[in-house]
Amino acid sequence: MSTITLIGTSLVEAGQEFVYQGEASACEGCPYRNQCLNLSEGVKYRITDVREGAQTLPCGVHDDGVSAVEVEPTSVCANVPARNAYAGSKAKLGGSCPHVECPSHEFCEPAGAEFDEEYQISKIVGDPPHDYCALDRDLTLVEFAPQEE
């Protein structure tokens, strides 16, 4: 189910994905805060529709203002321990990784997923993009189902 919210106009594009970070200090006292701060913090969203004819509203966070869009929670691709990783099961991330140069790092520490949370696997994507894991982890690249709001 989609939600109407306000997004910085430079980010307004159907298909654009972002992780909602919550309220900024500049939001205090804003007359539009109820329309902006209506998402769940830490959840990854995809813009599904840009509201035609929506006016640009001034914003203390986004220099170019904000516009109305429709968003839905979206899936997160992540590396999880390969043991018991299959579509329909639940999994946690394997833990933090200091190897930021690794091609899998963005999947070992994905935006929109927390280390201590369990997520439903909607799809097995396959092997991670790295040739070997510097932490000697046996990992599988999966897609977590969108989080329920």
Image: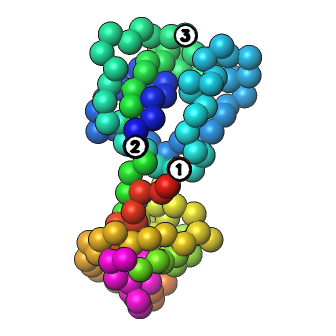
What's the distance in space between the residues labelled 3 and 2, CA to CA? 27 Å
Q: Is residue 140 visible?
A: no
Total marks shown come to 3
- Residue 103: percent from the left, percent from the top? 34, 66
Q: Secondary structure at mark 2?
A: loop
Give, as a single range, the part of the protein colored magenta.
Answer: 80-88
**Amino acid beneath label 3:** Pro
**Within 10 angstroms of label 3, few (less than 14), some, or many (20 or more) residues?**
some
Q: Are marks 1 and 2 in contact (CB under 8 Å)?
A: yes
**Amino acid beneath label 1:** Glu
Q: Report the residue marked by disc 2.
A: 1
What's the distance in space between the residues labelled 1 and 3, CA to CA? 28 Å
Where 111 falls versus 120 (above or below)? Answer: above
Q: Give left or right: position of 46 versus 127.
A: right
Is residue 83 shown in magenta?
yes
- Residue 29: percent from the left, percent from the top? 74, 17
Which residue is the extreme one toward the front? 1
Q: Mark 1 vs mark 3: which is more N-terminal?
A: 3
| Residue at the spot 29% in from the left edge and 71% down from the top edge | 123
Q: Main secondary structure of the magenta part?
A: loop
| Residue at the spot 40% in from the left edge and 38% down from the top edge | 2
Select label 1 or label 3 by which is in front: 1
Is residue 147 shown in magenta?
no
In this orientation, which residue lies closer to the viewer: 97 or 114? Answer: 114
Q: Are marks 1 and 3 in contact (CB under 8 Å)?
A: no
Q: Report the residue marked by disc 3.
A: 58
Q: Report the residue marked by disc 1.
A: 149
Question: Looking at the image, what colour scheme do you see?
Answer: rainbow
**Amino acid beneath label 2:** Met
